[in-house]
Amino acid sequence: MGAAASVAAMDLAELTTLRLGGPARSVIDATSEEQLLAAVRVADEAGDPMLLVAGGSNLVVADDGFDGTVIRVLTRGMTVSSDACSGAMVTVAAGEPWDGVVARAVEEGWVGVEALSGIPGSTGATPIQNVGAYGQEVAQTIATVRAYDRFEGKVRTIHAVDCGFGYRHSRFKAEPQRWLVLSVAYQFRLGDLGAPVAYAELARALGIEIGQRAPSAEVREAVLALRRGKGMVLDPADHDTWSAGSFFTNPLLTADQADVLPAGAPRFTQPDGTVKTSAAWLIDHAGFAKGHGSDHASLSTKHVLALTNRGGASTSELLGLAREIRDGVRTTYGITLVNEPVLVGCVL
């Protein structure tokens, strides 16, 4: 495949959905797994700081940029093994855009990711965050993750049971400097109906009860419509989509913490006994309405969980808004919200 291509230095704002971030010292485009591994190994051997970027939808990069090598994960490819008895095993290169994978899954009758439609970013990011939405998580369909272990210098295949999946979490997120995801294998059931719908808002949109099933294509269209209504489907003309998606994760509370929430606060008991509540509800009821902020950086006008670049914003302005919201929620409810995007060269 040859060596990865070096490109002219560029601002990370060109590579992130927030359109924020200063210059990278150097940028390398890796379009094959061989190029990707070679670029990472060269950087590691040289002790050069390295940042992997694919879709750029989960990054907040400092205004000063990144004084190191940015490696763009542009690998592509999908292999399919399918039969009526065992379903479909689909292995996807890390750089494949995720929503394209979901669209094909719906077309092919691969069941289990239809509710994850419209999520920006790359396939390789899905196990890292254990990407989830509308009652589905990728952990429900991932069979294995093939990853390069930078500490041991070798490629490993890790079965789902060993991935440490939790709410927006995995072993890959716990050790971000160790793992480079190369490809992800998904095990899908086959059929025209999607998985049982587990999210009330989606069930209402489909006109069904929670636990019932609907055609996968209808689930995908309903999810895309819901996400568009919240500014969560990328649109260059819509500044509400100039974001990193949900900026804060939904807090997981102890039962005692949940007991002191106001009566109207959402509560979802988890299998481990913790109670999940809604970050969006906390933000809204702490006094931060849609559109709160400045002409440069504000909450989305469609959904309070997204922090957006209205055009001309800086990372410092966006983080200032994030701190205001985090501190306001903590003062009001005693709960400290945790950012979901990865912060590069900056802190909240």
Image (tube, helix red, strand yellow):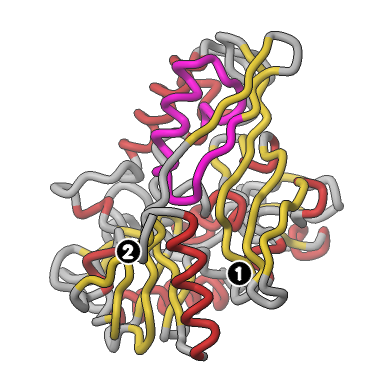
Q: Is residue 107 magenta?
A: yes
Q: Nearer the viewer, mark 1 or mark 2?
A: 2
Using the numbered discs, state the Cα–Cα distance from disc 1 to disc 2 in whole angstroms: 45 Å
In front of the other: 71 or 1: 1
Look at the image and give the residue range highlighted in magenta.
90-115
Q: Is 276 on the left-hand or right-hand side of 46? A: right
Q: Is residue 66 above or below residue 207?
A: below
Q: Nearer the viewer, residue 310 or 188?
A: 188
Q: Can you give x and y, in whole percent of width and height, for residue 138 in the image?
A: 62, 41
Residue denoted by label 2: 29
Circle 1 SS class:
helix
Residue 319: image location, x then y, percent: 37, 78
Q: Secondary structure at mark 2?
A: strand
Q: Quadrant of residue 21?
A: bottom left
For residue 301, say whether it is visible: yes
Compared with 50, 210 (above or below) is above
The answer to whether 112 is drawn above or below residue 163 in the figure is above
> Can see residue 196?
no
Q: State the residue at coordinates (49%, 35%).
A: 78
Q: Residue at x 81, y 53 (%)?
A: 162
- Residue position marked by numbered label 1 in the rendering: 333
For badge 1, the amino acid type reads Tyr
Left/right of residue 30 with respect to residue 185 in the rendered view: left
Question: For the residue marked with disc 2, what is the amino acid?
Answer: Asp
Q: Nearer the viewer, residue 329 or 234?
A: 234
